[in-house]
Amino acid sequence: MPLHLASYIKRMKKILWGFIIASFFIVTYKTIKGNRDHIHSLINSFKSKEDFIFDFFNQTENADTKVFSLDNFTLFLDDNPDKLEEYDLPLCPQKPPGLKGNLRRQDYLDLTPPPFEKISIDNPRLSIGGRYTPKHCRPRYKLAIIIPLRGRIRQLQVLLAHMHPIWQGQQLDYTVYVMWQSGEHLFNKAKIMNAGFLEASKDRKYDCYVFHDVDMLLENDECLYWCPTEDNPRSLSVYVDKFFYRYKSYTLKCRPSNIRRTQTVPYFGGVVMVTKSQFMSANGFSNIYWGWGGEDNDLYLRLWNQGYQLHNPYGKSCSYHMIRHKKEKSNAENKGHFALMTHAITRMKYEGLNTLRYKRLSTKREPLFTNITIDVGQPIKQYVDFMMYNVTDDELCHRSMPWDFQHSN
């Protein structure tokens, strides 16, 4: 071999070995740095959760009533099937027989609802706790219907008198959970919904969950409360008589940075259906919307950020009558909810199901529903000031966020 060729090969070997060694150290450094950054990210996320705790709880006489935290709640992850749900029956048909279709002209008894005893007599096949299972066929879906409530007993009577026959006619296997917020502090619908999801999941294994406002009555029983076969949540109550049955969508006054200024957001709320995986991927509702406004849009933005789109296969046949009601003082408008919306997506992994706190005070299996009474606590003083502060249009979206002053006391 010529001398100059041998020298060239020797030099190339040194360069190659140098490249291999350098690559090794670069990969090792990046791996260590990546793992370190990942660990720091996890640590920071756990620390950051504390910045979104704006509630406090008074002591209760019952020492067994503890503040709930997700760390000690594992039963909702149990995917074992319900042992009582082995059916030796044919599958229920895709279109349930006997549906009436348009119910729009029906008297909704807004002013004179029947008492619970009469509703129970009219629905003899309900099991204790407000559970129903078809007798002659195997149900296609198992639903948890979650109703957030405090007061409004008359509306609950109207809803159950109207909807129980519809749900049964649709051949659903369902249970109605009335999540009752105790006390007289500001209402927190989002916390109640999160708690309802977890309590229902602990109770049974469900295919999907329906978050159902107490004032929404379906006007066409062919709008089926069947769990979505496509992997997208459903907002059923898009067409409402109060809004003249117009498809409601709007541009957000305050929005996350990845939402275009001209992008419209569909109406999301009233009656919403999600699967467990959809809801958990969004980390549930945000817990920090005390009072009225914002929590439904916040959940929509969380789901949208996870790649979900709303789906409603029934179109205008899913229309609703909204029961009239007066605004409650305990559900005053949260004037800070616009600013909170700006951070809906960047906040979602730090705050939601993983920071939910509540006390379960009682569970009662009534003939028409399962009543779960919970204490959701009350907002800290600094947060109440944030909610009730009158802001100008310029301040609406860019206020000092409550997690900036959370530990100022």
Image (spheres, rainbow, N blue to C red):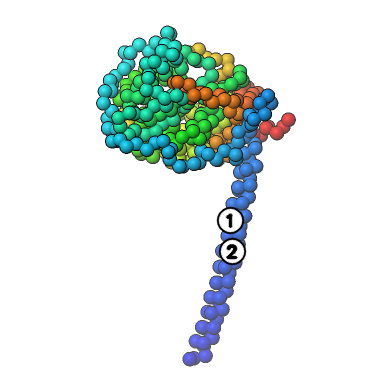
Q: Do the residues labelled 1 and 2 touch (CB within 8 Å)?
A: no
Residue at coordinates 63% horizontally, 45% vertically from top-left? Answer: 44
Give me the residue at 54% from left, 86% from top: 7
Q: What residue type is labelled 1?
A: Gly
Q: In this view, does 52 lie to the left or right of 242?
A: right
Residue topped by disc 2: 28
Percent across and percent down for residue 153 are 49, 15
- Frontmost residue, 213 versus 398: 213
| Disc ID at residue 34 | 1
Q: How far apart are marks 1 and 2 (CA)?
A: 10 Å
- Classify mark 1: residues with Cα within 10 Å, few (<14), some (14-19) or many (20+): few
Please provide percent x and percent y for residue 355: 59, 36
Q: Residue 290 has which mark?
A: none
Residue shown at 41% from the left, 36% from the top = 84
Quadrant showing the C terminus: top right
Q: Can see residue 165? A: yes
Residue drawn at (37%, 22%) of the image: 125
Compared with 203, 219 (above or below) is above
Describe the element under mark 2 as helix, strand or loop. helix
Residue 309 visible? The answer is: no
Total labels drawn: 2
Which of pointers 1 and 2 lies earlier in the amino acid sequence? 2
Residue 106, image quadrant: top left
Near mark 2 (Cα within 10 A), the count class, few <14, some 14-19 or many ≥20, is few
The residue under label 2 is which amino acid type? Thr
Report the front residue among 360 and 159. Answer: 360
Closer to us: 66 or 231? 66
